[in-house]
Image (spheres, rainbow, N blue to C red):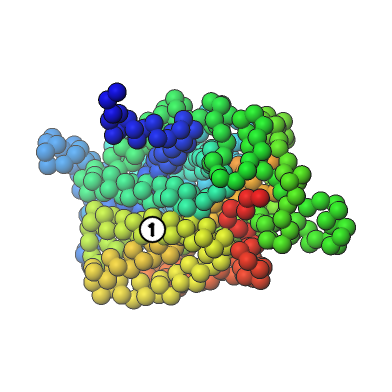
Amino acid sequence: MARLPLGIRFIISFSRDQWYRAFIFMLTFLLYASFHLSRKPISIVKGELHKQCAAGDEPEPRFSGPSSSTRHGPTHWILDNETDCGWAPFDKNNYQQLLGALDYSFLCAYAIGMYLSGIIGERLPIRYYLTFGMLASGAFTALFGLGYFYNIHSLGFYVVTQIINGLVQTTGWPSVVTCLSNWFGKGRRGLIMGIWNSHTSVGNILGSLIAGYWVSTCWGLSFIVPGAIVAAMGIVCFLFLIEHPKDIKCSSTVPTHSKVSENGINRFRLQKQTTTHSEKNGPLDPEMQCLLLSDGKSPLHPSHVVVLPGDSSSSMAAISFTGALRIPGVIEFSLCLLFAKLVSYTFLFWLPLYITNVDHLDAKKAGELSTLFDVGGIFGGILAGVISDRLEKRASTCGLMLLLAAPTLYVFSSVSKMGLEATIAMLLLSGALVSGPYALITTAVSADLGTHKCLKGNSHALSTVTAIIDGTGSVGAALGPLLAGLISPSGWSNVFYMLMFADACALLFLIRLIHKELSCPGPATGIQAPLKEH
């Protein structure tokens, strides 16, 4: 018999479950990367919406018709309310406040909608819910770009478009995190989700490159093309997304070498303290009873492994909003993410303009250079996941990176004025330290809390918990760009001081959990990585 080709041997070396799991990993990665791809253009186009006029120059209105030659650039109309200083109404001296209002309208709507999105998402099929959100998001992203072609200079038009787009984009995060968590167990969750969460940076990089390609010649396409990509991915989602492994009779957890109790196609492992244990050792602290850890002192008796039937999750009611808030760690991590996301999204929306002003580059080159921040973010997210898995201390990992991020931002604000080389180095380092905690909290921590022992296997809680944490973080995401727009006229140094203060606040909210992690013997944590198998 002939030896099988190397490629075929590689394919059959993986099981059916593993191939499906890899497919869902890549599909959800691409789906949410497209969401971020559509959010990036506004930061790239800011340098074109308002151009720096020469000192003392009075901007004069210019009239021109559509360009007859596409070779020298796309069609461009200039009306009586557009000037050499940019696109009205952003060509005035208050342009920073107006651009900040665009950011705030999107992010504020996103933050408010996120709280509702998780609750709605638990009660609807994920595939339909996510498909609707992606199609709607693509339409409103493209609508913003149509303002260029139809000569729309009304601030209200752009603000309303941003608000609606922010609302429909809230369908994305709870859906993809819930789907991924359905397919992957707790083992190596930090590493798996750290790699997976690089979709944020990948989407930002692609969005910057796509928007930057047209920003100087036809900025309308900087929105229309990303909008078309998001809508196309929505169709892919409808055709291919598998919400749960049980839908195709796959295992719901990654295989391990430990003994596993099975019932049908689902495997669940519930660890609980028995009444006998409580009577002998006295009542445990209520929070300690619900911690996502095994403290190493009380190994479970085999009879304490509870196996749920395959359809048990569907028979459980969705958790309430207040019930999700009572899960230990949800409030602390939510408030920490508020300030961590404030820093991250300020960079997301204002970094290209900052580079334009400080390094005196055009909008296209500034957009390309800003992608280095996201490259650093990829490594930061993966590094945070690996460290938290190895140490089994999620809060301590976030705290360490936040502690290092604040002085790094100060150095960035100082050396970025020294030249392009210094800016590149600090972009990579700042991206890693700023994005690391943000990535870890929104993925592995959210999944850990959404599958908390207190929930007794209720998988319906994951979407609500994820939405609460990311929704609270999105409040900070809305405040950051707004504050940057208000503070930047007084100097970019003040913006960096604001970001350093936000990092310190994020660290402050984790102090109690960090203390709990460090005071527990062994690898126990206040909010830990994977559960130890027994």
- Asked if 332 appears above or below 138 in the picture, the reply is below
Give the residue at x 61% y 30%. Answer: 265
- Asked if 262 appears above or below 54 in the picture, the reply is above
Q: Quadrant of the N terminus?
A: top left
Out of 34 and 225, give the one closest to the viewer.
Answer: 34
Out of 325 and 302, give the one closest to the viewer.
Answer: 302
- Asked if 48 appears above or below 396 in the picture, the reply is above
**Picture coordinates of residue 226, whole percent (x, y):** 34, 39
Out of 90 and 292, give the one closest to the viewer.
Answer: 292
Q: Which residue is mark 1?
A: 379
Task: Give left or right: position of 60 versus 439.
Answer: left
Out of 485 and 67, give the one closest to the viewer.
Answer: 485
Q: Name the element at disc 1.
A: helix
Q: How many marks?
A: 1
**Picture coordinates of residue 309, whole percent (x, y):** 70, 31
Does residue 451 appear in this view?
yes
Q: Amino acid at mark 1?
A: Phe
Give the residue at x 71% y 49%. Answer: 271
Task: Give left or right: position of 481 versus 255.
Answer: left
**Picture coordinates of residue 227, whole percent (x, y):** 37, 37
Task: Give left or right: position of 156 versus 55.
Answer: right
Give the residue at x 71% y 37%. Answer: 307
**Picture coordinates of residue 379, whole percent (x, y):** 38, 58
Tell me if mark 1 has few (under 14), some (14-19) or many (20+) residues whose alpha carbon lies within 10 angstroms of its own. Answer: many
Does residue 363 appear in this view?
no
